[in-house]
Amino acid sequence: MSTNQQNKKGLQLVFAAVPLLLSFIISLIAFFAAVFINGAILHADLPAEKAAGDGLVYLITYSLQIIIFGFWYVMILQERAPLSTRSSEAGTSDRKKAADSRKNPEKKQDVKWNPVTYWATRLPILLIIGYGLQLAVSAVIAILSTAFPSLFSSYKELISSLAGTGVDTMTFIAVSFLAPIGEELLFRGVVFSYARGALKKKWAILFQAVLFGIYHLNLVQFVYALVIGYILGVLADRAGSIVPGIVLHVIINLSAYLVPAFFIDNIPKAGLSFALATAIVIPCLMVMFRKKKKH
């Protein structure tokens, strides 16, 4: 590999990490925007120590992520396939198909493979995997928090503010729907695109998963976000689209509100829930990720 190629790949890897830093800046901007809106516009007293967990902060944060990283990802896609090239290729392909159809009217036309449609038909398996992953994570957290209560005390407070009882509407909408879109655009869209140009595919998937874990700024969340981020990375690569990952991410986040406390309120039940979730999720992942022929 030449020096120029090495420098180019190194630069792409730097670009792959920049979106993570930008996401922290976005969070900071959202924090001050929420404080200003609550104080100057809504005339609500919002102490600084409570502002970080305010639903408006999450709403602004993920809305900005969708706008900024959505635009960035679209630009990346356009750089990969310029409009003029796509139009030219599409026109040539259509003319060729038309000519073949006239020469061989009885010849069956090939159906164009559409990754979004392909994965949309697999919504049931995405539902199973999403809920199963959330149940498995909840069960492991329940077991470990019993053994190490001090380590998980801050984590429990965080989760209660995001998915506990009495969660405000803005937090629910932001965490359940906006966060999956913004985070998929950020990590499986922008970060993975740059990492893929600098690293081998498997390492690029791992790279974006590690950054996804770091993004949560919590040791407990880092561990399971790393695993989930890797699965979402493989899904984005196999599907050729971030749409299935957004769907799965929404299911995972929504499932945090749907795991009954009864399933994990003691270690035996949490262990059984984890075993059941694992026994279901692993075969589903194997089915979902097995190679399919493109028609």
Image: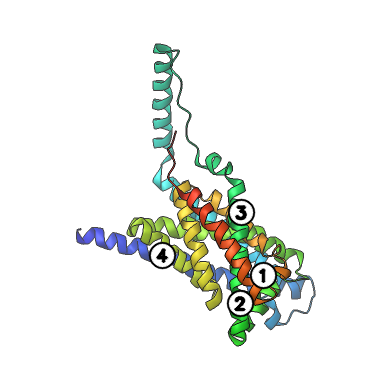
The disc label shown at residue 128, or none: 3
Q: Nearer the viewer, residue 211 or 76?
A: 211
* Front residue of this view, candidates 270 and 189: 270
- Is 49 positioned to the left or the right of 116 in the image? right
Residue 178's x, y, as percent? Answer: 64, 59
**Where does label 4 land, which residue?**
207
Q: Position of residue 140 (x, y in %)?
A: 58, 72
The residue lying furthest to the bottom in this view is 150
The residue wearing badge 1 is: 57
Which picture quadrant has residue 218? Answer: bottom right
Q: Secondary structure at mark 2?
A: helix
Tell me the residue at 55%/39% (across/down). Answer: 117
> In the image, 13: left or right of 250?
left
Q: Where is residue 274, by image quadrant? A: bottom right
For the residue marked with disc 3, what is the amino acid? Ile
Distance, label 4 to label 2, CA atoms, is: 29 Å
Mark 4 in CB contact with mark 1 (< 8 angstroms): no
Secondary structure type for disc 3: helix
Q: Which residue is mark 2?
A: 143
Q: Residue drawn 53% across and 71% down?
A: 24
**Pointers 2 and 3 in contact (CB under 8 A)?**
no
Q: CA distance from mark 4 to mark 1?
A: 28 Å
